[in-house]
Image: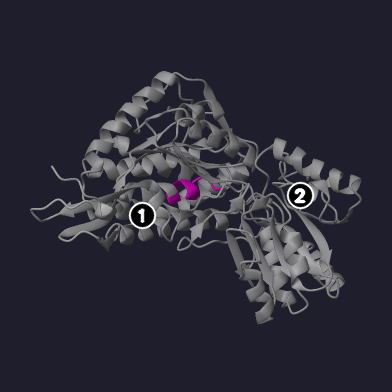
Amino acid sequence: MSTISANFGIEKALNLLGVKNINEGTSTGLNNFSAGDVLESYSPVDGQLIGKVATTTKDDYEKVMDAATKAFKIWRLMPAPQRGEIVRQFGDKLREKKEALGKLVSYEMGKSYQEGLGEVREMIDICDFAVGLSRQLHGLTMHSERPGHRMYEQYHPLGVVGIISAFNFPVAVWAWNTALAWVCGDVTVWKPSEKTPLCGIACQNIAAEVFKANNLPEGISCLINGDSKVGEFMTKDTRIPLISATGSTRMGKMVAQEVAARLGKSLLELGGNNAIIVTPDADIKMTVIGAVFGAVGTCGQRCTSTRRLIIHESIYDKVKTAVSDAYKQLRIGNPLDEKNHVGPLIDTDAVKMYQNALTKVVEDGGTVIVEGGVLRGAGYESGCYVKPAIAEAKPEFKIVQHETFAPVLYLLKYSGDVDNAIEIQNNVAQGLSSAIMTNNLREAERFLSVSGSDCGIANVNIGTSGAEIGGAFGGEKETGGGRESGSDAWKVYMRRQTNTINYTTELPLAQGIKFDL
């Protein structure tokens, strides 16, 4: 471990989370090990090896599924409010270890420590949401057309829920799925990103503590590790009725096809190419804050990161200058140092993608107005630190149509009314998050109308990033159509059943059909 990282309490955090000098295996619990290949986790912060994880073999996977399916038979019979109590305890454990887990997220993934803490806060919040939900997993009652009959709908747990998560939110997205799945009576099998496996180990350790303290089977929460081949164990497994997958559109299409082939369910949270529309009636100060945080937060590696800034021609130069000036104030460096705004990209492959995007936008005819580049020297030894860049471009540029998972912001100019800006915004394959900056009520309502933003998230006078767990999270088109977190997203983790009860001595048929014997 490097000296600079040790100075920020990383070693203490790893020890508290049980992931110091580990060679953990696959498993349902704390002490099961695998004979699979070794997966090494290096920090993009300083390039240091944090730990090693044994990947899941097919035999390991079968043991995990055996534990999960047996645990489900017990867990589903526990009343939902009692399951909620277990989730409450899990949330309390997260509160105890918030700082430690936030540091691990920051160190293994590279996002700022404040964002790491925010991610753990999301986990706590979804636990609180799920606890309340555990007392209101409601169905519907409706009137029957037949006398002396009662009809209603109820929801039952699905079974084993498979979760595939991405590196950019290495713990929160798992919790979004897991907390809801648990209160619904499901058990979970999780494959975290192979780029952030230690965050998965830490979460599994915390969950296992809670289950052990309550004499519950460890198979309620299971963990497997590895690359896409390990993920295929789940996508092809008919014992898993639902796969929730977060990642690239390319990955999501493969998951969807595989799961659909066996008539399973998939919940997909995929790519975003998010835009902020800036109208002549926008508050420029608010616009700058929303745009800059959206573009450079998590070093541009959020699915909700701001990729495009669509600015009216009458204020284009003013906004361009204000945003460019704000970029000059950004501090780039170790994300555990809270004075820094921007940490590293996840790895050198991401750096190459970033460099390629800047090359492509110039080849397409654009102009880079805030220069990018890779940072070298003391403090940047990992080779993953880059300068957030801004480029003037046109909506039709191929690179602008593409989701670049890096801190590259494209400035686009529009003329006429807000409908023209909305058309530019919607004219991409992705449909996750969107925003408009305006103090004009008519423009705001137009943006939110049926002919406005086609995204799953549409904001007014806030940026594209920073979703709260109370609302359903997800998007349309190549974003996959899934919904996680709040609102009625819980229903995807359950199967719906319609019931009709006849409490008479007669057996009338529906639709007035006569069938006399």
- Does the residue at mark 2 contact the one at mark 1 (Cβ under 8 Å)? no
Tell me, yes or no, if residue 52 can be seen here.
Answer: no
Rounded to the nearest whole Å, what is the CA distance between mark 2 and mark 1? Answer: 40 Å
Q: Earlier in the sequence, mark 2 or mark 1?
A: 1
Between 417 and 485, the one nearer to me in the picture:
417
State how the image is colored: one colour
Residue 392: give x, y in percent of width and height.
86, 58
Residue 374: give x, y in percent of width and height.
79, 44
Q: Is residue 175 rendered magenta in the image?
A: yes
Amino acid found under the numbered disc labelled 2: Gln
Tag 2 secondary structure: helix
Q: Please tell me which residue is depicted at 42% across the width and 22% down the height of the picture.
A: 34
Tell me, yes or no, if residue 131 can be seen here.
Answer: yes
Instruction: Reply above or below: 297 against 344.
Output: below
Q: Would you say 182 lies left or right of 199 here?
A: left
Q: Residue furthest left?
A: 505
What residue is disc 2 on?
401
Residue 401: give x, y in percent of width and height.
76, 49
Q: Main secondary structure of the magenta part?
A: helix
What residue is disc 1 on?
91
Q: Quadrant of the N terminus?
A: top right
What is the magenta range? 169-176
Residue 517: give x, y in percent of width and height.
13, 42
Q: Nearer the viewer, mark 2 or mark 1?
A: 2
Q: Is residue 13 rendered magenta in the image?
A: no
